Amino acid sequence: MRGIIGSMNPALARLQARGFIRQCTDLSALSARMDAGPLTFYVGVDPTGSSLHVGHMLPMFALKHLCDAGHRGCVLIGGGTARIGDPSGKTSMRKMLDYATLDAYAGAIVAQLDHFLSFDHRHVFYVNNRDWLAHLNYIDFLREVGAHFSVNKMLTYEAYKKRLETGLSFLEFNYQLLQSYDFLTLSDRYAVELQIGGDDQWGNIVAGADLVRRVRGKTVHGLTFPLITRADGQKMGKTEQGALFLDPALVSPYDFFQYWRNTPDEDVRRFLLLFTFLSVRDVEAILTQGINCAKELLAYEVTRLMHGTAVAQVALQGARAAFGGCGDKCALPTFELTQCTLQVGIKVTDLFVQVGLCTTKSDARRLIAQGGAFVGLQRVADIGAVIDQSALDLDGTVIVRAGKKRVVRIVTDVLE
């Protein structure tokens, strides 16, 4: 990182203290520019799916911090670039999407971001690069933009070097030019002076800043954030079931809450600083109260920010009911069995598959053999056990659990 200084702009100092800053084109120059007054900056997100996931959100937290400091944020929805696909971090070419699909995805993503950012067009706004990329004249684009790019230099960037081993299409090779053109267009239209993003975007960001300098003679800046992995080696936002999506139809708020509640001890402080807006002082104070208290607060705060206070409260009560013996069991993921089924009885291996805690009976048998299957408070020891009405609590429900993390509340229907 260039230009680390003792007297840093307060907004940048806040980001650095919280662990956001990974690389900057020139931190000293950016700090001086921000000291001179508010600037407009942007972060891009391509609508390649119907929902954002946690991996998208670190730059959005940084955006909020910068906007709170008086700067103006722009979210660029990549409705044009998504038709090509960014090769950064990918081992193969993305599936090509049509405009109708991309427009639907873009609408869903804007709605999610509006919940988090509250687009007001004064402090934070969004644009879609489809507006200027969809009708580009290719010859003019090559003359205006392509002439400023060196293929030799492009091939030194990590995103391209890795893909050369597995195959890089000419379509994807153009992505950096288009993202750079975005920076140029935003500089012209909205006086954007800074692009922020994940560290996998470093090459594209530097290329865009260089294009603005060459074509317009302006100095603009780039700032990247670390790609987050957990202490257990797991990629941030990845679960056994896939990505940790923000859409509650894809990942339930309870499962979302539990992901954060199960953060490795070593990551709790870092994630409280990155994924909440609690002050550094408050984070340090919380950690003195014990790691489990801090984990619960982390889970609650992130769930609240993504899904709202009411939903976060329900998830918190469900978690306490499942693992603490208090709280509201109604908040847990629920599966309905007929009373007839329980009157006859159901094999425990079948039950765990039906409620989704195991994918196959073999998985269920393995779970039982390892001592990780629970019905109510009782550990299941017998692979051939049959679960019937006697397992129900006084309220007519029972909690079944796989290991320490996954639980389902079973309810019964009412016989006529």
Image: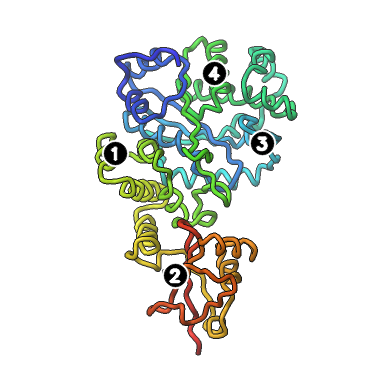
The residue located at (50%, 87%) in the rendering is 415
- The crowd level at tag 3 (other Cα within 10 Å; few <14, some 14-19, many 20+) is many
Using the numbered discs, state the Cα–Cα distance from disc 3 to disc 2 in whole angstroms. 53 Å
Using the numbered discs, state the Cα–Cα distance from disc 2 to disc 4 in whole angstroms. 58 Å
Report helix, strand or loop for mark 1: helix
**Residue 392 x %, y %:** 44, 78
Report helix, strand or loop for mark 2: strand
Residue mark closest to the camera, 2 vs 4: 2
- The crowd level at tag 1 (other Cα within 10 Å; few <14, some 14-19, many 20+) is many
- The disc at residue 283 is 1
Res. 211 visible in picture: yes
Instruction: Choose the circle earlier in sequence order: 3 or 1.
Output: 3
Q: Which residue is mark 2?
A: 378
Apparent side of residue 17 relative to residue 366 in the rendered image (left or right)? left
Q: Amino acid at mark 2?
A: Gln
Using the numbered discs, state the Cα–Cα distance from disc 3 to disc 4 in whole angstroms. 22 Å
Q: Which residue is mark 4?
A: 206
Q: Which residue is mark 3?
A: 83
Report helix, strand or loop for mark 3: helix
Q: Is residue 7 above or below residue 19?
A: above
Q: Is residue 358 above or below residue 280?
A: below
